[in-house]
Amino acid sequence: MESPLLSILALVALVLLVVVTGGVGYLTLANWRDRRLQEQEKREQRRPVSKRKEK
């Protein structure tokens, strides 16, 4: 017969695995989003603000 303690430990391990996996996924997504925004800001800074006609 299976011990109730082993069932609880297995359930806790599964929950922790899901939480850690979700955390890693969230951090990866946040890092990707931040990097994309930084690259977009760099591209916008390189563009000339306005083209002036010199006389």
Image (tube, helix red, strand yellow):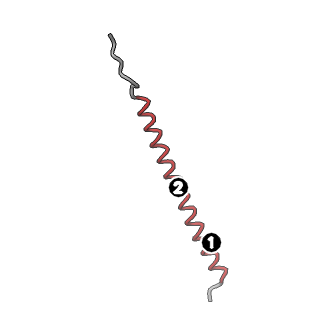
The amino acid type of the residue labelled 1 equals Val
Describe residue 10's horizontal placement relative to residue 50 as left or right.
right
Q: What element carries label 1?
A: helix
Q: Which residue is drawn at 46% across and 41% down?
A: 37
Relative to residue 38, is residue 25 depicted above or below? below
Look at mark 2 in the image and give the residue it sits on.
26
Q: Are marks 2 and 1 in contact (CB under 8 Å)?
A: no
Q: Where is residue 46 in the image (x, y as percent from the top left)?
A: 41, 29
Residue type at the position of mark 2: Tyr
Q: Where is residue 19? Give x, y as percent.
A: 57, 63
At x 60% / y 66%, what residue is drawn? Answer: 16
Location of residue 12 (image quadrant): bottom right
Q: In which quarter of the image is the N terminus?
A: bottom right
**Residue shown at 66% from the left, 83% from the top:** 4
Labels 2 and 1: the sequence-earlier one: 1
Q: Name the residue under label 1.
A: 12
Label 2 vs label 1, nearer the camera: 2
Q: Which of 55 and 33 is in front in this view?
A: 55
